[in-house]
Image (spheres, grey):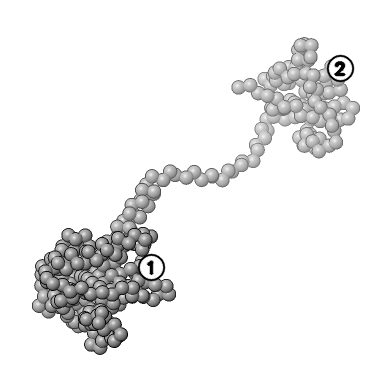
Amino acid sequence: MLNLVRPQPHVQQQKRRLLLTGFCLLAFLLGVRVLFAQPTTKPHPMVIAPVQIDPSFNLQQPQKAAPEQERSSPCDLAPPLHVQVRAALWHKDPAQVRLSNASGHMVELTAGESLANTEWTLQAIQKHALIWRHGSSGCLLQHALMTHK
Amino acid sequence: MLLKRKRGAVAIAFVVGEAWLTIAEVVMAARQSTQVNMLCQRPIHTHSSMSVAQLISSHLVKKTAKKSKYFFSSRPVVLVQWPERYYRELTLQRPPKLTLTGNGLAALLADAGFNPKEWRWDVQVNQGHCQFLLMKLTDYHEIYHALQEHRCPPDVIGWTPRPDTLQFNFSHSGAWPDIAATQQAVHLAVQYFTGH
């Protein structure tokens, strides 16, 4: 339809201008979004290094896999909880562990010595744990050591 | 175009003749059909554009004052056709690679002897040719501003040629003195909906 109020060339030009404006606006918004976007933190894959065992630290008895074996054993015993570990003295040779019993008396044990009035024998003093052996059942139990920083 | 064709839209076409002002009100009815609601003619006693603008304005005010009719719909579309002597029609062969947005059409018009700065023009580009409708810029501004001053700026200033064969209903012969103008008015309003 021929219309002198809104001629076709004028309408087409307006449409083109509107499209161009819309495109520019869209490009501007995308640009703003890209510029001000916060970098996303992608979790890096964690590489777990194999546990290195210090070769200088040896148990006196070559039973390294004993605690692992004992864990699966049916021993349902608790470590000697009536004593508190006060200190582990690795610098002594042989290494000692200083314990205090319920009455507050200090007892020093080395590996292989048994706790008085109990069936527990200190099997080994490891870096982070004490290994106890129960006399009658022969069960091995691990007593974790808390290190103070 | 989609909005133009919406149901219930109203187009009022004013065909200004040398002596008569013919009005046709066409409503876009259901099922894409048009419906002529009103058709009337009023003689123009004075031929100045201002008096015609007053007639058009008064008619529109009378129509739009009926709030119930246009309350939920948009205002009626106003189409105006001025007397034939104001228009020039021109059909030119379409040059290759012609676009609507470039300066090619203005150059084509200039080649045909019409300065594009002195004429208000619109064009319909077909496959083989370009059909121009022109009106002197001074006439266009006079018409448009006269209607604008009376608060009825037209949406369309168009042109439909006088029909060669008149479709005349004899039973209403007394009411329609200018039958060709009535057909032109209806055709103009229908053209708005159909877009052709």
Q: Could you say where residue A8 lies in the image, as x and y percent from the top left? A: 24, 70
Up/down of A138 relative to A19, above or below: above
Closer to the camera, B5 or A37?
A: B5
User: How many labels sit on residues?
Assistant: 2
Write the residue at 66% across / 32% down: A54
Q: Could you say where residue A112 lies in the image, as x and y percent from the top left? A: 80, 23
Instruction: List the residue tagged with mark 1.
Output: B8
Up/down of A136 relative to A48, above or below: above
Choose top left, top right, bottom left or bottom right for residue A53: top right
Position of B192 with respect to B85 (left or right) is: right
Closer to the camera, B149 or A104?
A: B149
| Quadrant including the C terminus of chain A | top right
Q: Could you say where residue A4 lies in the image, as x and y percent from the top left? A: 20, 70
Q: Could you say where residue B112 lies in the image, as x and y percent from the top left? A: 12, 79
| Quadrant including the N terminus of chain A | bottom left
Up/down of A44 relative to B168, above or below: above
Q: Is residue A131 visible?
A: yes
Please tell me whether mark 2 sits on a helix, a strand or a loop: loop
Instruction: List the residue tagged with mark 2.
Output: A117
Please tell me whether mark 1 sits on a helix, a strand or a loop: loop
